[in-house]
Amino acid sequence: MPLDLSVWRVRPEPGPLVAPSGSGVLDGETVAVKDLFAVAGQRVGAGNPAWLAAAPVQEAHADAVARLLAAGAAVAGIAQTEEFAYSLTGANAHHGTPPNPRAPGRISGGSTSGPATAVAAGEASVALGTDTGGSVRVPAAYQGLWGIRPTHGAVADGGLLPLAPSFDTVGWLTRDAATLARVGEVLLPEDEAALPDGAPLVVSDDLLGLAAPEVRDAVGRLARDAGAGATDWAPEPAWLAAFQTLQAAEAWAVHGPWLADRMDTLGPAVRGRFERARLIGAVDAATARAAVVRARAEIRDRLGERVLLLPSTATVAPRPEDAEAAREATMLLTCVAGVGGLPAVSVPVTTASALPAGACLVGPAGSDRALLALAGRLGN
């Protein structure tokens, strides 16, 4: 079968691209690595052919890649991402949109699009990706996968090409909860704030209301089955505005020097985001940063030792022509964990139309392993 270049940039046949360097809890697992992580002997392409052409060959593996290899996993290949990970649809103007095996004709979700599709299609068992504004949780929901965005800074990001360092996290997706947790044993530190026994699980009607009826109903069923209590947590557009401004300012600070005279190498959607990002001045960036600091403290204080259950996305995977329509509502949901710097696990649920969706558990900072265990109990 010819290599699907919308999914994979590098995937040798027969594989793997990189054999395990050790043995451990991930023996036999195969990893699709998002094209932002260093893999020794390969270039980092970031979804952009011009960047790839100028990129040096990496001499060492990214920290997360090295740890997975040492635990017995093999790297199946390097999978596609949206350009510089600055989008959530999965579409790449140069390589196309990876298919969605669980919802044919609908988008894959991004920006960890290629790795997610590889796992959903059974071509790898682990997708190593990143989540800045939802780039693990969105494809997890759209493709019926398990996915985690860890506490900000919990997983070492050495050898990762950044987008917005205040929000970037190393995350992963799998087809089952047990594998998701085993990857966590390798990549996550011991919990700093383990959930107390019987930690309250809470759900907000206002946050549920951001989702389309079929997603709201599927997540609501899980909440009722789990005995979740009610909370008055409301959507906060100001949090999202501060997140988007600071993300954009940092993205331009990271990539602007290279992109300044190469904007024509970007696809239209990502180019538009970088064009807006280059206009953000120092005062606006500083104001947004201060707002994020305040919001992070407020979110953590409001959550306390509870676990918040909310939809991972506002809709099921849209068709391509509808891909941008639900973006704002989805980001109002994803920014809670993003601004809070909190761990978030997307648990697959099925809607009445048999399409996949995601229920997201957001826990206290540093409770990642316990949150994975709780997610596994709720989703099985």
Image: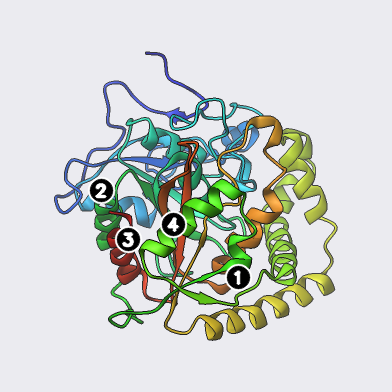
Residue 47 position in % (x across, y down): 58, 37
Rounded to the nearest angstrom, the CA distance separating label 3 from label 2 is 30 Å
- Residue 142 in percent (x, y) is at 50, 42
Q: How far apart, in angstroms, are the residues tagged by discs 1 and 4?
A: 27 Å
> Which label number is shown at residue 339?
1
Residue 150 lies left or right of residue 209; in this view the side is: left
Q: Earlier in the sequence, mark 1 or mark 3?
A: 1
- Three-letter amino acid code of the residue under disc 4: Arg
Q: Quadrant of residue 12?
A: top left
Label 2 or label 1, whichever lies nearer to me, is 1
Tell me the amino acid under the disc marked 2: Leu
- The residue type indicated by label 3 comes to Leu
Q: Residues within 10 Å of mark 3 (few under 14, many from 20)?
A: few
Residue occupying the point 18% across, 40% down: 28
Query: Residue drawn 63% across and 67% down?
Result: 206
Q: Is residue 262 above or below residue 249?
A: above
Q: Quadrant of the C terminus?
A: bottom left
Q: Nearer the viewer, mark 3 or mark 2?
A: 3
Q: Which residue is mark 3?
A: 378
Image point (26%, 22%), residue name: 14
Q: Nearer the viewer, mark 4 or mark 3?
A: 4
**Tag in front: 4 or 2:** 4
Task: Indicate which disc residue 69 carries.
Answer: 2
Q: Secondary structure at mark 4?
A: helix
Dot 1: within a 10 Å radius of its alpha carbon, few (fewer than 14), some, or many (20 or more) residues?
A: many
State whether residue 313 is above or below residue 266: below
- From the image, tell me which residue sits under label 4: 221
| Whole-number angstrom distance, CA of label 4 to CA of label 3 | 11 Å
Marks 1 and 3, Cα distance to the nearest angstrom?
25 Å
Q: Are marks 3 and 2 in contact (CB under 8 Å)?
A: no
